[in-house]
């Protein structure tokens, strides 16, 4: 076991790192689902837009300015999408909102296509994050090491916000019962906006970490990580934040071990590389069949 | 203190409330009784701002509050204890009370103490999740939660629904206690007997209109009320 771990250390490291990035995206899916019962298909594309805006901003601005601007832009984008595409459909059937989300997803992708001309844009090297380090004979970049810690810190902060602040309490109330929340004097539209803004903020952080590793951004760059984060959210039990985080780390690690040198069923690593994406989705099917509510899916505690 | 004039409300494609008018005196208990679907709940939901009226005027302490949103109305001092209690099941009892005071910016510790003294059971269970309480305890919590907004007028929609007779008696005695503390009560009930005994003033609703009104005690003696609602 120790030998296996040591042999595959660099894949473990990148697995934990990618897992952390998926986790930050997955939280956006799971929080929005928790409150609106909506799968926000545009979330992966918001993540892509954050990457693209970083490319354009960093061309003329120093990182100390462009990074905060990217965060602000992404939060504003999340807010705007909710206001324009979801809020007017508040009392419409859920299917309509979902279709609106798919529409926003395509709109963002095509807007990106228009601005980039379809060319892959080279992501800037953020000096601190891109530096190489060697730990225990495995060579990697600072971003790989920073990601899991940053993820854990952000998740802890978010959990504290939800558990111990007034707005967090309002979020939990609204996610259960719109009407009774209104009777308490809670403005549900405000709470929903804040939820989208938090999700978008985390997606922007994820984009900074993710694209530093992947070096380029295309209009469809958001689909695959978005989809995998979504699988992670379903695996963890959609609506549950700890579930999404744990699911994301598991998927990130498994995926990279498969990609890497591990010998599975007697076939050496290189033989499985092409199946790493397939694994994630096969995994999704298995989860949906075996445990549709995921690891920490909503338990009903109602008692009459 | 509170007055409704010519209120009509469409709900679910039908005219659920038709041109009703009534008023509530400060410090009194007023009840709306009537059969299922008579429009009682819709009336309360309209006052609370959850449903927009088609026509009519609602005045509270001299101010027109017709068609305002729920947060505004709670802020003015009108609260609704909804039908079926609607406790937040995954908030603790303590949090359920805190969220009742959502709009308040001042200290709420004394009010929580007051609610705990009204309902000692809630103090014992303050760290439990709302969803784990029994029906009677949930009703107490729903009333306590409503009180946390420091209402001047508390509306209650079917507080006795689904509760054991002994618990219903408790709830009604609590309603009187709350009134004695200066909170005006507007009560909707199908349990007409209990409601009429408790109320100072009562209105009977039938298919969206008010057909009869009078003092609670007088209506208990009224023949048509006895036949239709008291089963005598």
Image (spheres, rainbow, N blue to C red):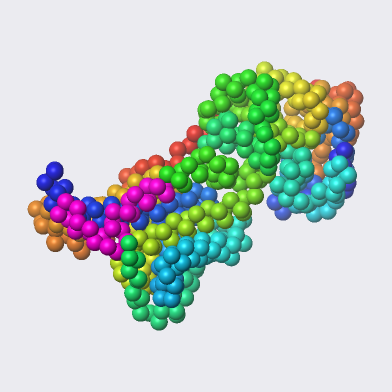
* Residue B67 x, y percent position in the rendering: 78, 52
Closer to the camera, B86 or A205?
Answer: A205
Answer with left or right where residue B30 lies relative to residue A50: right
Corner quadrant of residue B181: top right
Closer to the camera, B84 or B221?
Answer: B84
Instruction: Say how many tags the image has.
Output: 0
Answer with left or right where residue A268 lies relative to residue A45: left
Residue A69 in magenta?
no
Closer to the camera, A232 or B217?
Answer: A232
* Residue furthest to the left: A266
* Residue A263 x, y percent position in the rendering: 12, 53
Q: Which residues are magenta?
A: A129-155
Q: Residue at x 69, y 37 (%)?
A: B106
Closer to the camera, B10 or A166?
Answer: A166
Q: Quadrant of the N terminus of chain B?
A: top right
Answer with left or right where residue A73 lies relative to residue A145: right
* Residue B72 x, y percent position in the rendering: 74, 47
Q: Residue at x 86, y 41 (%)?
A: B61
* Residue A188 x, y percent position in the rendering: 62, 50
Residue A151 in magenta?
yes
């Amino acid at each position: 076991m120790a030998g296996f771990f040591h042999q595959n250390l660099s894949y473990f490291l990148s697995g934990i790192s990618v897992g952390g990035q998926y986790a930050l995206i997955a939280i956006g899916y799971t929080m929005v689902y928790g409150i609106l019962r909506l799968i926000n298909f545009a979330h992966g594309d918001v993540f892509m837009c954050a990457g693209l805006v970083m490319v354009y901003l960093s061309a003329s601005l120093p990182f100390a300015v462009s990074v905060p601007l990217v965060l602000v832009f992404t939060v504003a984008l999340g807010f705007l999408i909710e206001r324009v595409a979801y809020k007017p459909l508040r009392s419409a059937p859920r299917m309509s909102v979902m279709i609106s989300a798919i529409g926003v997803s395509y709109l963002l992708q095509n807007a990106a296509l228009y601005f980039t001309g379809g060319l892959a844009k080279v992501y800037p090297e953020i000096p601190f994050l891109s530096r190489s380090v060697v730990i225990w004979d495995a060579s990697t970049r600072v971003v790989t090491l920073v990601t899991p810690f940053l993820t854990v810190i952000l998740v802890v902060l978010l959990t504290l916000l939800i558990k111990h602040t007034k707005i967090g309490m309002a979020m939990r109330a609204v996610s259960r019962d719109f009407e009774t929340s209104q009777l308490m004097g809670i403005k549900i539209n405000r709470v929903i906006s804040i939820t989208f803004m938090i999700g978008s903020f985390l997606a922007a952080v994820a984009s900074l970490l993710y694209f530093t590793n992947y070096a380029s951004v295309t209009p469809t760059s958001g689909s695959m990580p978005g989809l995998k984060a979504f699988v992670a959210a379903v695996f963890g039990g959609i609506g549950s934040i700890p579930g999404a985080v744990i699911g994301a780390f598991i998927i990130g690690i498994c995926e990279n071990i498969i990609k890497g040198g591990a010998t599975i069923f007697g076939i050496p690593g290189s033989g499985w590389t092409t199946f790493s994406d397939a694994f994630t989705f096969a995994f999704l099917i298995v989860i949906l069949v075996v445990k549709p509510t995921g690891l920490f899916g909503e338990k009903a505690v109602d008692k009459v | 203190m509170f007055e409704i004039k010519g209120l009509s409300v469409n709900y679910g494609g039908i005219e659920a409330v038709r041109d009703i008018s009534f008023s509530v005196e400060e410090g009194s208990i007023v009840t709306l009784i009537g059969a299922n679907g008579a429009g009682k709940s819709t009336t309360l939901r309209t006052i609370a701002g959850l449903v927009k009226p088609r026509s009519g005027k609602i005045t509270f302490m001299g101010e027109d509050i017709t068609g305002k949103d729920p947060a505004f109305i709670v802020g003015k001092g009108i609260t609704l204890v909804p039908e079926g209690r609607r406790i937040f099941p995954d908030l603790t009892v303590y949090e359920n009370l805190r969220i009742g005071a959502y709009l308040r910016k001042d200290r709420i510790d004394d009010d929580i103490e007051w609610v705990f003294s009204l309902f000692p059971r809630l103090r014992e269970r303050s760290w439990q999740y709302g969803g784990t309480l029994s029906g009677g305890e949930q009703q107490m919590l729903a009333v306590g939660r409503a009180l946390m907004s420091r209402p001047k007028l508390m509306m209650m929609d079917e507080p006795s629904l689904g509760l054991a007779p002994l618990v219903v008696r408790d709830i009604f005695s609590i309603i009187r206690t709350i009134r004695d503390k200066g909170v005006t009560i507007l009560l909707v009930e199908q349990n007409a007997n209990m409601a009429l005994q408790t109320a100072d003033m009562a209105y009977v609703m039938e298919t969206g209109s008010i057909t009869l009104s009078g003092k609670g005690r007088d209506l208990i003696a009224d023949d048509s009320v006895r036949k239709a609602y008291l089963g005598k």
